[in-house]
Amino acid sequence: MAVSSQNKPAASTSHSAKRKHPKKHNHYGFQDFFSFKPETGSITDWNESRNIMTSEDFIIGLVEGLEEEVGSASAVVMYAIGSEWGTKDAEFFKQWFEKEYEREIRQSNLMFLLETWWWPFTSQGWGRWEVDLSDRKHGFMFINLFDSAVARTLGDVGKPVCYIYAGLFAGFFTSLVKKDLNCIELQCYSMGETYCKFLLGNKDRIDAASFWQNEGATARDIQKRLQEGDGVR
């Protein structure tokens, strides 16, 4: 798994494959996306972001360390970390997307935009996703995440654990649409599910979903209630 440190894309790239093919967009191979420089001990990706390779021990240490320090508030802290990450990554994404594709974000197809944003995360080991925009006109949307790095590492613990992802989605989409959005994980691989499912929407909808979840509602129950208009103000 890789953790990136965002920087403003450089005017002249140090990525060997990008220097050779500056207009190439389908950089989907591992060796294409990452540039390894053993002489300096650095790893950069196609977007000129520096990466650090970590093991699952990094996630375990982060989660268990926070739980030891702040107890049950660790979930709030993880969400806040993810939100800050998403906010900063939205700014970085805008820079490299507009530089590479030579168009403004607002002029791009939304699904193309989202898949382009998430591709580096997939390359870095954070999992694959599916974005369901069918309820966007009602003010909310669902995101399915497969192979969550956090849930895969912690295993079946019987509760949602992907708070950093929820914060990441909330931070990024808030910056993208310029409207305050919250996010909650409705089901998790760590609850024995085959994938993780997130709800993104305004505070009223997320609060309603959180209440229903605490009352024992499943992700399917919550999705149905929202689509029927419950929790809407």
Image (cartoon, grey):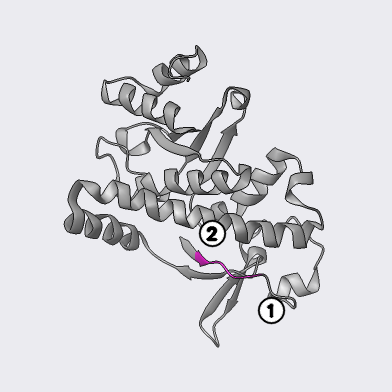
- Choose top left, top right, bottom left or bottom right for residue 22: bottom right
SS for callout 2 = helix
Q: Which residue is mark 1?
A: 14
**Amino acid type, callout 1:** Ser
x and y, in percent, of residue 82 in the image: 43, 52
Regarding residue 27, the answer to whether it shows in the image is no
Indicate left or right for 214 with 120 as reference: left
Q: Is residue 73 magenta?
A: no
As drawn, is 158 to the left or to the right of 19? left
x then y, percent, for residue 122 = 55, 51
Looking at the image, residue 29 sits to the left or right of residue 145; the answer is right
Which residue lies at the image location 44% right of the left edge and 15% below the top edge?
230
Mark with earlier residue (1, 2): 1
The overriding secondary structure of the stretch rendered in magenta is loop
Residue 36 shows which numbered tag?
none
Residue range (magenta): 4-8
x then y, percent, for residue 167: 43, 47
